[in-house]
Image (cartoon, coloured by chain):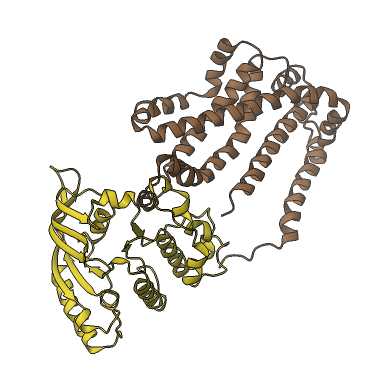
Amino acid sequence: MRPAPLSAQLAVALPVLGAASLLLAWQFLLPWLGVPAYIVPTPTAIAGVFQKNAALLLDNLRPTLIEALAGFVIGNLAGVLLAVLFVHNRILQAAYFPVVLFFNTIPVLALAPIIVLIFGLGMTPKIVIAAVICFFPTLVNMIRGLDGASDNEHELFRVLSATRWEVFWSLRLPRALPMLFSSLRIASATAVIGAIVGEWIGSDKGLGALIIQASFNYQSDRLYAAIVLSSALSIALFCVVVLVERRIIKY
Amino acid sequence: MANAIEASRLDVGYGGRIAAVKVLSSLDLTVEAGSFLSILGPSGCGKSTLLRVVADLLDPLGGTISVLGDTPHAVRSRRDVGFVFQDSTLLPWRSVRDNVRLPLGVGQGSLTRKIEDRSDELLDLMGLAGFGDRLPHQLSGGQRQRVAIARALLGEPKLLLMDEPFGALDEITRDRLNDELLNLWRRAGTTILFVTHSIAEAAYLGERVIVLAANPGRLVKDLDMRPLKKDGNRCSREDPAIVAAMAELRIALEQAS
């Protein structure tokens, strides 16, 4: 028998308690065990950075946010458009989809220096890296989604003499939306990773640059604050995706 | 009365003309306009394939077929054909009403006549008044199939093709929907081709029942039910004449399998 589900209060309270217990252990147990602050600073020390260096953090959040957002939009848009092209032109798909899949096997970390070489040191290479990371999962998911309608559904539209355009808008696209949103959720995290990786390779601004500088200077509280902020950025992006998804997909 | 379907020496298969696996072989079939034809047969006998050829979803390999005196393609383009699938094929993201309205939203470009939005009237007719705003997943299997029929009727088809529409339903629901379907048919005068593998359903619904055999699909029995029924294709499921016809169909079906 399956265990009874938790009550609503417990379902909220338990994760909060879990996180709080870990934070407490981090705050008190780690120093007590002799873990030095330059390796793991306490949560209060990290929180202190948010207070002391708020302006610095914000200055570095802004470029990363812009790069991640722009990469997210461009990468996903390109993925969606190419998927639409592929499902309507099987010859193009047969010719180029394997090549596209091959490119996907190249680790972005390996690709990043080349992208920096091509696009220089500004924001552009970071946006491109973020976009490349978002692009592949969305392309693959979107193709699968656009092809996800059943034979009967296609026959139904054919009996109604629907045009390709109508089949696209009334059948393929709505069928693909759940798949699209599942890849957008993944992309909300990977876009931030892409922007930060881009900043590692060549930048003096952004959370990625801050992480590199702080680790070289043994400013570990600053390093951790930057990590927390990057994660918050991913979470915020993820929440936006989920909110939009809930408004659009109601079934 | 004119014929709704005239097929002669019809060959249908998959996999191209040369390496084709024949599903229907040299089938001759004439269906009177306005009649109710039940099609029985074992799996793989081509009964669904026959509907697909009539609906212009599949091209025959050989032979000729005319539907409502025209080619299947012309008839489909005019949208004189309605199709009801075994799974209701409702679009899960559309409300019940919007599913019924689908024929208004797509394929209108090829139409010369204008079809009216009778969605609420049809939902009412199918016993689904008040369900228009629900989503398909909130309905039972029988209700979903009613929605699918309402959607097919919205386009006012002259020919309704039904591919085991009640195959997945429980008996009570199926019997009830059988009666509702007969009522609709009497009112609208639509020609219905009804594929099923239930002998009882075929005998109860059809003015005529044909049995197809498999490998390759061919006609092995053609039974006129009208002499056994009252006016308007009415009968009782327990009527000895109907029961005897069912036994006759069962023997044909067993030999065909």
Left or right: A232 as drawn, with respect to A131: right
How many callouts does the rendering have? 0
Q: In this view, does A117 lie above or below B129?
A: above
Q: Quadrant of the N terminus of chain B?
A: bottom left
Q: Which residue is drawn at 15% across and 43% down?
A: B17
Q: Which residue is drawn at 41% across and 47% down?
A: B107
Q: Residue at x 40, y 29 (%)?
A: A97
User: Residue B184 appears at what percent x and percent y?
Assistant: 38, 72
User: Residue B178 appears at what percent x and percent y?
Assistant: 36, 75
The foreground one among B75 and B177 is B75
Q: In this view, does B222 lie above or below A119?
A: below
> Looking at the image, can residue B135 be seen?
yes
For residue B90, what is the image quadrant? bottom left
The foreground one among A195 and A157 is A157
The foreground one among B232 and A84 is B232
User: Residue A83 appears at what percent x and percent y?
Assistant: 46, 33
Q: Is residue B212 above or below residue B62?
A: below
- Residue lying at the far right of the rendered structure: A52
User: Residue A112 appears at what percent x and percent y?
Assistant: 56, 18
> Looking at the image, can residue B57 be seen?
no
Instruction: Chain letter for brown, please.
Output: A
